[in-house]
């Protein structure tokens, strides 16, 4: 990393984030990271099941539905239970979950979860479905098994995955809109900041996979300076183009984001065009973030080793769960790169909280879209956002106080 970019990172992130940012000496060392070192970091065990000396055999898994919400319930032979929620994709992906993923896990020992993530991928021809379609259902299973193991051992998910190192997670609020004029968008961002007490936001630039065409003519060029002018210098600004640009246009927009001291520029180019993204990363001082659509361990490894981006963003569902995402974070840490989890699903922020509770090198702010109003009271103490940071669940497993109550009125989804 050149000193311009390092200085930029420090200026953009503010004093509180200095500990997660690279120093000159580690940045120099990180240039020498080899594939062997990355593979070794990724291969280290993630799950800590010390003291769990008896098998936890999975007896059943059921996909359940209540209204538009989907749940997965896993039961062990000795009567323990765990549950998970989906990310809004189970209405389409339930056949993959029910026919290709769940059957692999029945009769297996839940303690071997890490190895099962490879086993289910290899099972029959599942790897041919690799992508969001396979890994989202696997993530749902992983979350439910982690909940079960947490309830059996009395540990939170963060404790199971290496140990809790933070109990509050600073977040940016993601706007998610492109239908707004620049003036409307800034007003909307102000409302989000006010409602949530957030210190950081993310908004969308460009036209979303639209080959340089903006969502409204001239929106992005006006929006970027306007946000800084209206929001002031204390709000941390993130921008996401959702694969909108070719490298020349991305570099132009990236320079505008540098001018307002934004934190990062997400998915500047079509997400699977790693060469194009690397060109932009090489040209800009502002960090480039990438990875929400990525499903390949090897491509994350390539992205990290070649520094095609500066920040990696596995989606905890699309990428197949917490354990796989932690392996990415470990590789990124070797290259002095922070990981900022991407969120899908209304409940997804809860899995983000557990991820951020135990991963050492996360970005200064993790993603949050919504969900506190709906889910905060499922936990004891209730989840809260305090001073721009959300509290991490404290109960065993995922931390839901009364799963049986939550599952009341659900019906089994077959097929
Ligand atoms: Mg994005």
Image (cartoon, rainbow, N blue to C red):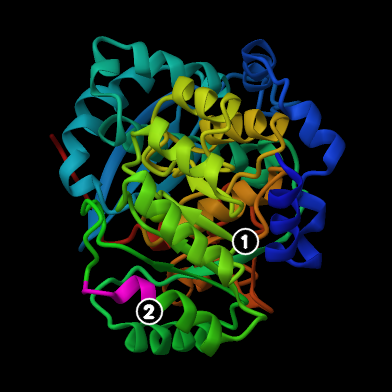
What is the quadrant of the C terminus in the image? top left
Q: Which span is picked out in magenta?
A: 216-222
Instruction: Determine which quarter of the picture holds residue 258.
Output: bottom right
Which badge, 2 or 1, comes first in the chain's sequence? Answer: 2
Task: Report x, y in % for residue 10.
Answer: 75, 59
What is the quadrant of the N terminus in the image? top right
Helix, strand or loop at disc 2? Answer: helix
Q: Is residue 346 left or right of residue 195?
A: left
Q: Is residue 101 left or right of residue 335?
A: left
Look at the picture and state if 382 lies above or below 243.
below
Q: Nearer the viewer, residue 63 or 6?
A: 6
- Residue 217 inside the magenta-drawn segment: yes
- Residue under numbered circle 1: 365
Q: Nearer the viewer, residue 192 or 93?
A: 192
Residue at coordinates 68% horizontally, 50% vertically from top-left? 5
Q: Nearer the viewer, residue 332 or 261?
A: 261
- Residue 377 inside the magenta-drawn segment: no
| Dot 2 alpha-carbon crowd within 10 angstroms: few under 14, some 14 to 19, many 20 or more | few
Residue at coordinates 62% horizontally, 38% vertically from top-left? 152
Q: Nearer the viewer, residue 299 or 214?
A: 214
Q: Name the mark on residue 222.
A: 2
Q: Is residue 128 left or right of residue 365?
A: left
């Amino acid at each position: 990393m050149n000193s311009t970019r390092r200085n930029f990172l420090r200026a953009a992130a503010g004093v509180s984030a200095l500990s997660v940012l690279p120093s000159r000496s580690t940045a120099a060392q990180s240039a020498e990271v080899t594939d062997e070192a990355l593979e070794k970091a990724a291969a280290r065990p993630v799950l800590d099941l010390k003291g769990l000396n008896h098998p936890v055999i999975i007896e059943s898994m059921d996909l359940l539905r209540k209204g538009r919400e989907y749940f997965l319930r896993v039961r062990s032979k000795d009567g323990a239970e765990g549950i998970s929620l989906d990310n809004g994709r189970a209405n389409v992906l339930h056949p993959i979950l029910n026919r290709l993923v769940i059957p692999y896990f029945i009769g297996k020992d839940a303690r071997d979860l890490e190895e099962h993530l490879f086993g289910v991928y290899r099972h029959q021809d599942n790897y041919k479905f690799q992508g969001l379609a396979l890994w989202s259902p696997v993530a749902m299973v992983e979350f439910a098994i982690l909940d079960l193991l947490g309830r059996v051992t009395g540990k939170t998910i963060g404790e199971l995955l290496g140990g809790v190192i933070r109990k509050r997670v600073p977040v940016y609020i993601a706007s998610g809109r492109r239908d707004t004029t620049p003036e409307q968008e800034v007003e909307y961002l102000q409302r989000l900041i006010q409602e949530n007490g957030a210190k950081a936001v993310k908004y969308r630039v460009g036209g979303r996979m639209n080959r340089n065409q903006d969502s409204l003519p001239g929106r992005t060029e006006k929006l970027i300076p306007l946000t800084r002018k209206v929001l002031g210098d204390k709000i941390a600004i993130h921008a996401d183009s959702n694969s909108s640009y070719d490298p020349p246009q991305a570099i132009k927009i990236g320079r505008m984001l540098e001018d307002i001291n934004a934190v990062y520029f997400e998915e500047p180019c079509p997400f699977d065009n790693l060469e194009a993204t690397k060109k932009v990363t090489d040209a800009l001082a502002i960090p480039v973030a990438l990875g929400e659509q990525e499903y390949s361990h090897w491509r994350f490894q390539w992205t990290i080793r070649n520094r095609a981006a500066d920040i990696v963003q596995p989606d905890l569902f699309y990428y197949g769960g917490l354990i796989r995402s932690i392996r990415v974070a470990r590789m990124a840490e070797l290259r002095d790169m922070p990981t900022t989890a991407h969120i899908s699903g209304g409940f997804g922020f809860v899995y983000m909280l557990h991820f951020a509770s135990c991963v050492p090198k996360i970005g200064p702010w993790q993603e949050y879209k919504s969900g506190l109003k709906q889910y905060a009271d499922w936990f004891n103490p209730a989840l809260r956002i305090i001073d721009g940071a959300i509290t991490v669940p404290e109960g065993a497993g995922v931390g839901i106080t009364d799963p049986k109550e939550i599952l009341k009125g659900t019906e089994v989804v077959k097929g």
